[in-house]
Image: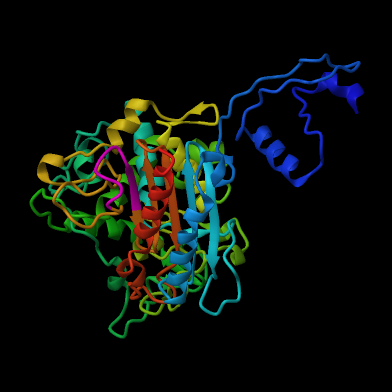
Amino acid sequence: DLLMTYSFDGLIMAYQNSNEAQFYAAQLIFGGIGADATLPVSNKHFDEGFGLTTKPSRLKYDFPESLGIDSKLLLKIDSIALDAIEKEATPGCQILAIKDGVVFHNKSYGYHTYKKNKAVENSDIYDLASLTKIIATVPALMFLEENGEIHLDSCLEYYIDLADTSNKNNLSIREILAHQAGLKSWIPFYKQTLDNNGNLIDTLYNDKYSDKYNINVADSIYLHNSYPDTILAQILATKTIDKTYQYSDIGYYIFKDIIEHKTKLEFKDFLSQQFYNQLGLNTMGFLPKNRFDRSRIVPTEFDYYFRSQLLQGDVHDMGAAMLGGVGGHAGLFSNANDLGIFMQMLLQKGYYGGERYFKKYTVDQFTKCQFCMEENRRGAGFDKAVLEGQEGGPACDCSPFSEAFGHTGFTGTLVWADPDEQFVYVFLSNRIHPTSENKKLLEMDVRTKIMQVIYDAIRTVN
């Protein structure tokens, strides 16, 4: 009712109730596009030429041609993804690409499993594995660093009570984040909770929740509440090697404890309150089966060696599972769209949707190479393209060593942000279904081949 317009903060004149009008009106409301038009005629409420001007503040969703990209060039993405699915490199995947703040490719392929009972949808939720490091732990440390609670070059002994004789006391946060601390790559904590026949030790586990057995490892499996202390003791007891580059999960167990100590909040609650909720990331978070219908959560492995069940909504990583599904190194779940928004915020130097989450300086400090002189390509938590003369790495050759940053995940995931190209790429899959022994996604270079196609397409415009 136009008679009531005096009480509105704004009014959108879309003219037609078409799909296109609804599509762009919704984006205008949420800040994906700006408004700069004026009314061509007058009426008793508004004068000709009246209009409010706004600037876009969030991602816009549009066709590739809106950026000058030929859609035909992106058909190769479909071909690579469908070929990977046909060859059983993964049952399905989500692929998202952003250029200059515009989502120009957001598609899902294949199915949740090889039974093909449920097709993957854009709203479905994947286990992110080690993407947790840069989407959860590192942002929390960035927040603490900005607020003077930690310093990258200070050692662990300043932030958490470790054993006086621990060989971890003199490791700096920067060294651990860049995998330059000489830590063991990983520890199979779960193996010490199995008997000689490979069964769960009944004094450590129970099939029912109680005050004593309150750590949910998977469906009908609850771990003794004291066991996280045992995990920390095992971490403290491990030997360190020379401070050379070796990828490691171990330090992220300790980071989680530091973050909880400094914020006075549970890890998952701090992240939701400080980042995910404010950014509107509805799917992103830990413990997804507590928040969503299980049919939306893409399953990972049939875990025959520890939990003896198909994992769907429980984190695949065994160590994170033994912490109740919330780890500093693994445990986060999301869809591609929410990941794209978080990476876009980092690409925009900590700014998104009219809010500043980090200072530009902080983002630059954490995403830059930390130990290049030691031939270590890593940032402070973030992965980078390989250094000159090196092989491998998370990116295609099309992304030379520069400001670009991202990370990969064991379950078959990848995120990448390139400030030079103003480009974000997200690939999510469950390549470890039904078994993590399936290495085809890596052997076929699926993730990097798709990255190459997207780089080639956007560079036809540049």
Direction left: furthest residue: 242
Q: Give above or below for 246 relative to 202.
A: above
x%, y% of residue 136?
41, 45
Front residue of 230 and 280: 280
Tell me the quarter of the image containing the C terminus: top left
User: Is residue 201 one of those drawn in magenta?
Assistant: no
Residue at 34% across / 57% down in the picture?
448
* Closer to us: 460 or 355: 460
Q: Judge left or right: residue 123 versus residue 163.
A: right
Image height of 129 relative to 177, above or below: below
Q: Is residue 371 above or below residue 363?
A: below
**Picture quadrant where residue 354 is located:** top right
Relative to the observer, which residue lies in front, 87 or 248?
87
Residue 360: % across, % down: 37, 26
* Residue occupying image coordinates x 57% and y 58%: 290
Residue 399 among those drawn in magenta: yes
Residue 269 appears in the rendering: no
Prevailing SS of the magenta stretch: loop
| Whether residue 148 is visible | yes
The colour scheme used to paint the residues is rainbow
Q: Position of residue 212 (x, y in %)?
A: 45, 63
At x 67%, y 33%, the residue is: 28
6 in relation to 354, above or below: above
Q: Which residues are magenta?
A: 397-407
Left or right: residue 434 compared with residue 294: left
